[in-house]
Image (cartoon, coloured by chain):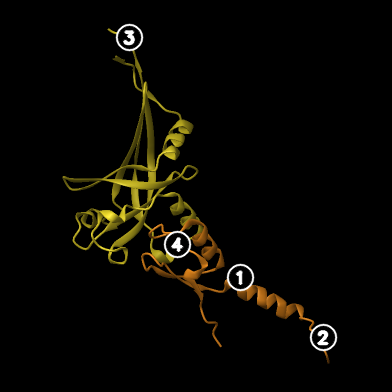
């Protein structure tokens, strides 16, 4: 059956849920502090700076954690 | 100039003074041995919590005083003649482990000035930076108005 690009609601929900809980690895370019963070924490760090040393950070300091297979 | 009687500040005025400033003197003690250092802080007036970054090296004296949840005192003062104001905070210094960090913590520490890392000879990755909350048990503000009268 052709779906014509239609995304089943269940699959769309899973994609949203996955991105909400997806973790990133933060590595501060100034002090080297490394920690796993979720999207909300990532946004807070970009807005407020590294929580450990106070240095400004950009999204370049974050890399997505590989999802398990 | 004569000193007027010292009067207690309201909670609102006390919180305003703490919000105007970012630095103070933190005092700790171990037995009869005192220790005091200038620190920078972020202040949450709703919960009356202070957020501090404390920097040390393995050999530093500071570490010896940062035992588990030590009692601490923080003093913040200002001179704005003819008015002198001071706030003394007593409470417990609690370390925030990295794995207990929350978005709120990140926001609160964002308000605290960065330590002057230049004071230490080591580069930042070689310094031990610990995050603390000073949980206030008592916050007391006083102000004194000086007058020009001569007694």
The residue at the point 38 percent across, 42 percent down is B137
Circle 3 residues within 10 Å: few <14, some 14–19, many ≥20: few
- The picture places residue B125, in percent across and down from the top left corner, at 31, 66
Front-most of residues B96 and A36: A36
Which chain letter matches label 4? B
Whether residue A20 is situated above or below residue B49 in the rendered picture? below
Q: Secondary structure at mark 4?
A: loop
- The picture places residue B74, in percent across and down from the top left corner, at 32, 41
Circle 4 residues within 10 Å: few <14, some 14–19, many ≥20: some
Disc 2 to disc 3, C-alpha distance: 89 Å
Q: Is residue B68 visible?
A: no
Residue linked to disc 1: A20
Residue linked to disc 4: B101
The residue at the point 40 percent across, 64 percent down is B98
- Whether pointer 4 and pointer 3 mark residues with C-beta atoms closer than 8 Å, the reply is no
Colour of chain B in the image? yellow
């Amino acid at each position: 059956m052709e779906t014509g690009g239609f995304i089943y609601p269940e699959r769309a929900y899973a994609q949203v849920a996955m991105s909400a809980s997806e973790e990133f690895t933060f590595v501060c370019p100034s002090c080297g502090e490394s920690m796993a963070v979720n999207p909300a924490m990532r946004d807070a760090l970009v807005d407020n700076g590294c929580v450990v040393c106070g240095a400004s950070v950009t999204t370049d300091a974050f890399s997505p954690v590989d999802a398990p297979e | 100039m004569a000193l007027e009687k010292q009067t207690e500040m309201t909670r609102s005025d006390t919180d305003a003074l703490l919000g105007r400033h970012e630095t103070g003197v933190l005092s700790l003690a171990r037995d009869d041995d005192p220790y005091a250092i200038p620190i920078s802080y972020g202040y949450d007036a709703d919960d009356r919590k202070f957020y501090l970054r404390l920097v040390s090296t393995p050999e530093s004296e500071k570490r010896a005083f940062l035992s588990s949840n030590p009692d601490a005192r923080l003093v913040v003062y200002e001179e704005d003649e003819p008015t002198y104001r001071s706030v003394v905070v007593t409470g417990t210094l609690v370390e925030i482990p990295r794995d207990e960090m929350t978005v709120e913590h990140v926001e609160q520490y964002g308000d605290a000035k960065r330590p002057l890392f230049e004071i230490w000879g080591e580069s930042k990755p070689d310094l031990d930076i610990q995050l603390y909350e000073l949980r206030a048990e008592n916050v007391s503000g006083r102000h004194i108005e000086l007058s020009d009268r001569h007694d």
